[in-house]
Image: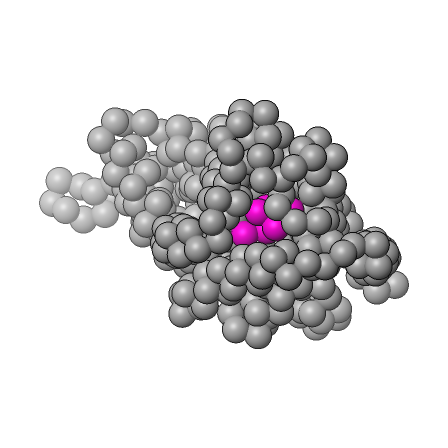
Amino acid sequence: MSYVCAIVVFDAVLIAVLAKSTAFHAHHVAMFGALTACGAVCIEATRRLGMPAGVSRDLLSAWWLPVAFLLPPVYALLAPIPMQILLQLRVRATVLYRRVFSAAAIGLAAASASAVFHRSVSVPAHLSAGEGGPIAIAAACAVLFTVLNTALIAVAAHASDPEGRWGEVLWDRERVLLDAVELCLGVLVAVVCGLNLALLLLVLPPVVLLQRSLLHAQLQAAARTDPKTGLLNAAAWQREADTEIVRAQRTGDALALVLVDIDHFKKVNDTYGHLVGDQVLAQVAATLRTQLREYDVVGRFGGEEFVVLLPGADVHEARRVAERLRTRVGRMVVPAEQATITVTVSAGVAIMNVHGEDLIELLAAADLALYRAKELGRDRVCLPAAPVAPPPRSADGAAGAIP
């Protein structure tokens, strides 16, 4: 929290300092108002779609970057404030300090990019003249904006969850692609805006359409995801598992299913509260995810149960993976008030074509194995008990004595 406060205070002080040293001209204020209005239209146009919980992506940088390139840096500091207020009031209310921190982080990143651009390009209007130099500098400054903004937010996210992986708050392939789209849009809008402010009316509709498409894709992904753990929810997991099982049946490849259950989870909720229980769920999910392959299918099955499908895994590989998951979760520590929490898990393993032929049979077999692990004392991995062979029958059909 101290880091968040420091960023917000620094942003506020910088706004005050630059506001005193900046001459506010009518055409600058008009351009700032026009770009802010375009951002507001984008927000209103996508409001009915909603916004997924957690960290979501939008294309509002298409309006912040032109402010940074065409106007003095103080405007770049101010630009995110009305946008974040509008998002809070009109789209999705969230914890207020997150909105304030987001506005500060975006403002500082945009102001840094603005300062570098104005130091390198003495006349911002040259950006709209089609000269290669100013456009290349604008692109470089857009990259600087993205790097600084991501770094400021990543540090805050890592501070709130020190056990989380940096890769989850930095970049992956999809985030890099979205950042590239945002940067291109920002530079293009800056060029168009510098030519004639009225041309924003031609730029606005395609940007709105792109933002609606982006949010729709994020909402579709959110509908497949369990909100507490970030894993697939039960319905989405079942759809993907069915696809993998059909593929394994067609190719004859091995496949295993592991059902994982947190031992005595109700005691954690009763002792420390449901918020701490949610932290335990999230950290167990993160631990499972780090120990599995990209193509393994992992989801939250409900309550404190998780389910993992292991394509290509035979009984030995499945047991080895399940034991690794059990061991890693057992080493996990979740901080709570005046205490640290450790948990264990029990796991049931079922192998395709050994314990079942389809998903329902595999789940039933893994559930029986999990029940067996609980009966044997928990914190262990079990397979279903071997079926009892029927007694030999005599020629007349009666059961014979077993030697």
Residue at horizontal 42 percent and vertical 51 percent from the top: 199
Q: Residue furthest front?
A: 26
Q: On the picture, is 309 further left or further right than 250?
A: right
- Asked if residue 397 lies left or right of residue 199, the reply is left
Q: Nearer the viewer, residue 291 or 139?
A: 139
Segment colored magenta: 63-68
Left or right of residue 224, residue 143 in this image: right
Image coords of residue 15 (percent x, y): 79, 58
Q: Can I make out residue 59 in this image?
A: no
Which quadrant of the view contains residue 149? top right
78 within the magenta span: no
Number of numbered discs: 0
Give the quarter of the figure containing the N terminus: bottom right
Q: Is residue 274 depicted above or below 13 in this figure?
A: below
Decide if residue 194 is on the left or right side of residue 208.
right
Q: Give the main secondary structure, helix, strand or loop, of the magenta stretch.
A: helix
- Residue found 78% across the figure and 50% down from its top: 159
Magenta stretch: residue 67 in it?
yes
In terms of depth relative to the viewer, which is nearer, 328 or 104? Answer: 104
Q: Position of residue 43 (x, y in %)?
A: 48, 64
**Residue 115 is at least partly visible in this image:** yes
Name the residue located 69 percent from the left edge and 69 percent from the top edge. Answer: 96
**How was the colour assigned to the protein in this rendering?**
one colour
Q: In which quadrant of the rendered image does the C terminus lie?
A: top left
Q: Which quadrant of the view contains residue 25?
A: bottom right
The image position of residue 90, as x and y in percent, is 52, 73
Q: Is residue 185 above or below residue 43?
A: above
Residue at 75% from the left image edge and 70% from the top image edge: 271
Q: In this rendered view, identify the residue nearer to me: 185 or 89.
A: 185
Residue 121 lies, in percent from the top left, at: 67, 33
Q: Is residue 81 above or below residue 211?
A: below
